[in-house]
Amino acid sequence: MSDNTILIAAKFRGPPNSGNGGYVSGVFADALTHGVHNLPNHGAVEVTLRAPTPLDQPLTTHREGESLIVRHGDALIAEAAIKNFQMDVPAPATWDEAMAVREQSYSFPVGINSLFKTPLRGVHPICFCCGAELAPTEGAHVYSAPLKSKGQVAAAWIPDASLADDKGFARPEMIWTALDCPGQMAWRAEGTQTGMLGRLTARIEKQVHAGERCVVIGWTMGNEGKKYFAGTALFNSANELCAYAKAVWIGRWS
């Protein structure tokens, strides 16, 4: 067992005052699997978010075996565990299809988020994943738009060099980030505004290069009461499945 400290910088926010669910899940997943070389054949990490992740505050991680506990003081923030995980992924939109609907992304309408006194663009204007109000190197810029012919939302995404490791690949936590917001946007495309991300289970199959044309898709997977399930997946320029995830979104805004 071991204990370490993690700090989530303010730039990696989702809501204005807490971490982006995909990004923090990716960071917690990395903390769990760092140095682990024997993941099962279909190994993935399931991260359950128990409370909003505070920004610029030290978080204590406690790792034991195949699980990780994250706390802020006495408050339980998240739990991560290695899981055997597979899911069916639908055929994705092509790059051209995703680009054709890009301007209809939920990241662009002005003034739809009432939390900001000054009207800003998008559902989550300053979210590290989908925020359109961020500078090119200050966010991931995953702009999902509905593609009704395929029953999914799609984002044409080119990972910026600022998201890459020293070998030029998008860092794992950035892949987790990209797999976050499209799931919520898939529900929005069906008329449901879901609440907070409660759980994200993700598997990375293949790395993607910074500067590579990628497509991220999201689709709904039904609900159980206040739990809304969504799938997301990332494809590279060769249309190869590189990563996929299942999310549980909790509650509704309206």
Image (tube, helix red, strand yellow):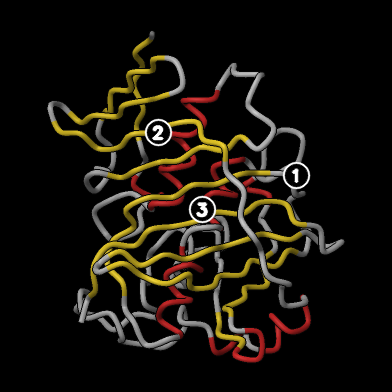
Q: Judge whether 174 appears above or below 112 on screen.
A: above
Q: Which residue is drawn at 55% across and 73% down?
A: 143
Front disc: 2 or 3: 2
Q: In which quarter of the view is residue 225 placed?
A: bottom left
Q: Name the residue under label 1.
A: 206
Q: Judge whether 147 appears above or below 123 on screen.
A: below
Residue, far right: 238
Q: Which residue is drawn at 37% across and 88% down?
A: 191
**Drawn side of residue 141 relative to residue 72, left or right:** right
Q: Name the residue under label 2.
A: 80
Front disc: 1 or 3: 1
State the image coordinates of residue 112 (x, y, percent, origin top left): 31, 85
Q: Which of 43 and 224 is in front in this view?
A: 224
N-terminal label among 1 and 3: 3
State the image coordinates of residue 235 (x, y, percent, origin top left): 73, 61
Determine whether the residue tagged by mark 1 lies in a helix, strand or loop: loop
> Mark 2 belongs to which amino acid?
Ala
N-terminal label among 1 and 2: 2
Q: Which of 155 and 17 is in front in this view?
A: 155
Q: Mark 3 points at which residue?
A: 177
**Drawn side of residue 130 relative to residue 1, left or right:** right
Q: Crowding at label 3, few (<14), some or many (≥20) Cα neighbours within 10 Å?
A: many
Determine whether the residue tagged by mark 3 lies in a helix, strand or loop: helix
Q: Judge whether 212 appears above or below 114 on screen.
A: above
The N terminus, quarter of image? top left
